[in-house]
Amino acid sequence: MATWSALFKKDFRLTRTVFFVGLVINFLILSLTLFVDVNTGDNLYLFIPLVVAIAFHILYLPILLFISLKTEANHLHLWLHNPRSAAALLLSKVLNGIVMAVVSLVVLYSMAGSLIISRFELIEAYWTDTWTAGLLIFPHILMISIMFGVWVILLWSLYHALKYRIGRWTWLALLGAVILPTWIAALIDSTDLFKQLTQWGSMELNFTTFLMDPIPLYAGEYLYHFIVIVGLFYLSTWIIDRKVEV
Amino acid sequence: MRNVIEFTHVSKMYKKRSAIKNISLSLPLGKIIAIVGENGSGKSTLLKLIAGLSHPTSGSVTVNGEIANRRIGKLVSYLSDHDSFYPLFTIREALAFQASQFPDFNRAKAEEIMRYLQLEPDKRIRDLSIGNRGRLKIVLTLARDVPYILLDEPLSGLDPMVRQSIVKGMISYVDLESQTLVMTSHEITEIESILDSFIAIRDGSLIRMADVEELHESEGLGITEWMKKTYV
């Protein structure tokens, strides 16, 4: 445990500047929101800067992981010489990113909450509906961010596995590694078999104040995305343990 | 299981360039061995192959019977010719991190080598001079109680006084009962006195592996003279 916590602390230190810069940006966005609030009064425009900031968190993990891995690439022999498995080394970075993203999102949500809490007592139901929708967006933003983050890890691993083998063609291979699976996934997603396999455990979300139709969600789809994330992560660890060279 | 590093018909290509050509050799425990050769002859690649940080294109490299992949780091302590630490750490933090990641890291030995090399533990690594960075790399690498210590150009870029203290440190802190030290260096004259054997390579091919004593007896030459004769 001490081994892993030392790794976690080191990874935090590698990216803490980005984390703190992110928090400062959050506070700037709060200032902008307050400005909108003062100038427009009680309406949903208030949320535009906050929504943009929350949506931007989709890129939080990819950016953080890219910076962390890029720093490791500056002295790759040092990182690779660590006898821990690639899974342990990468998990430390991913969890670091998740913790930072969660803290950043919680800060944004707290700001948003403090702005609208007084309005919960008002008759406009859209305030509470907006808040509930916002809470549901939270785990989805994280999930999408993790998915993109794992893609960054995979592409980084591929790059370092191929750079001495195929040189300048590596970028083409990486492009292929993005386009081909995306195309295949799009084909699979559109089949009836895929729908049968994933569209189970249905839930419906109703936000009647701003959406006419309910939003359908399926537990099967969440499981599918979870399996994809684990699969891509495992593939990256396999590449790093067996193929990446300095 | 044999306590040796074993190369069996190892070749290594980087794209179309051949870095190592069909090398077979074994390195036993309890020796100080230098890998010598011209720039770009494949010396660093040999060390990286042992450390599992590079993979043979053909053939195999084993360390104590295990295929050398990156996780062979548990048996091998590797010092790169590049920086081998996170610059955000202080020296003390670098030692603590190394100790946390390598169960074989001997903290007392590290403290001793650090004192011997006159490093100040509270200094931040990014503020260290090249000489002190070189010394710190030596501390981090030699303080591990592993069978194999690999040093890639440990004396490169250091002034003669630092070089001398590092060479002395190698003799003092490597336990030849249980460890083998393999290093590459261009400063052959400075390390020759502590060497047991040498491996000479040229353009990726092994041209000679012998004991230094045997070279003295058979040809009456030191490694430097032998290299001048052979390479020029």
Image (cartoon, coloured by chain):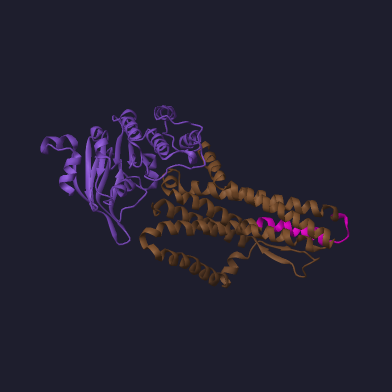
Chain colours: A brown, B purple
Q: Where, by quadrant of the figure, is residue A199 drawn? A: bottom right
Number of callouts: 0
Q: Please give left or right for residue A146 compared with residue B200 in the image.
A: right
Dominant SS of magenta comes to: helix
Give B89 or A153, whichever is nearer the viewer.
B89
Give A96 or A188, whichever is nearer the viewer.
A96
Boundaries of the magenta span: A120-139
Q: Is residue A124 magenta-colored?
A: yes
Picture layout, residue A30 above or below residue B107: below
Q: Residue at x 39, y 32 (%)?
A: B143
Q: Please give left or right for residue A120 compared with residue B206 in the image.
A: right
Residue B81 location (% of width, % of height): 36, 45
Q: Residue at x 41, y 40 (%)?
A: B130
Give A13 or B225, whichever is nearer the viewer.
B225
Q: Residue at x 54, y 70 (%)?
A: A188
Q: Where, by quadrant of the figure, is residue A83 drawn? A: top left
Residue A214 location (% of width, % of height): 74, 67
